């Protein structure tokens, strides 16, 4: 339900469930709009850059961890033998994420 795309005017989606003991309906919030935090106009470019940098670093770390595990499974001390190439490829993926 987190990837549900609703109009920004929608603040909440509530479903009513029937309580088996009492027979009454109870509300259950399925979606609640948290709204967005505002940033001053001068800081928006820096915030956008920092956000993109964080996403790029997370991508690079995920790629490196996957390659590290794969190298470790394939060879004895494989993570160490493939360290430079794994770091380079992870860096490349992170850089691609930063540019896009």
Image (cartoon, helix red, strand yellow):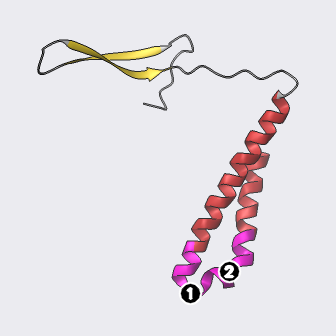
**Vertical placement of 13 versus 81: above or below?**
above
Vertical relation: 90 (above or below) 83? above
Q: Residue at x 51, y 24 (%)?
A: 5
86 drawn magenta: yes
Determine the secondary structure under disc 1.
Answer: loop
Measured along the vertical axis of the image, is residue 31 above or below residue 48? above
Q: Are marks 1 and 2 in contact (CB under 8 Å)?
A: yes
Q: Secondary structure at mark 2?
A: loop
Residue farthest to the front? 22
Which mark, residue 75? 1
Q: Tell me the residue at 78%/35% (across/down).
A: 48
Q: Which residue is outermost to the bottom?
A: 76
Query: Residue at 56% of width from left, 87% of height from top?
Result: 75
Tell me: 1 left or right of 89. left
Residue indicated by mark 2: 82
Residue 85's spot in the image, x, y percent?
A: 72, 75
Residue 42 vs residue 97, the one in the foreground = 42
């Amino acid at each position: 339900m987190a990837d549900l795309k609703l109009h920004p005017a929608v603040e909440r989606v509530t479903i009513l469930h029937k309580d088996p003991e009492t027979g009454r309906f109870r509300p259950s919030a399925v979606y609640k709009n948290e709204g967005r935090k505002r940033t001053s106009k001068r800081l928006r470019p820096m915030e956008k850059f920092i956000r993109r940098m964080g996403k790029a670093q997370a991508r690079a770390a995920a790629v490196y961890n996957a390659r590290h595990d794969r190298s470790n499974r394939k060879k004895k001390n494989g993570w160490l033998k493939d360290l430079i190439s794994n770091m380079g490829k992870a860096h490349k993926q992170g850089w691609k994420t930063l540019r896009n």
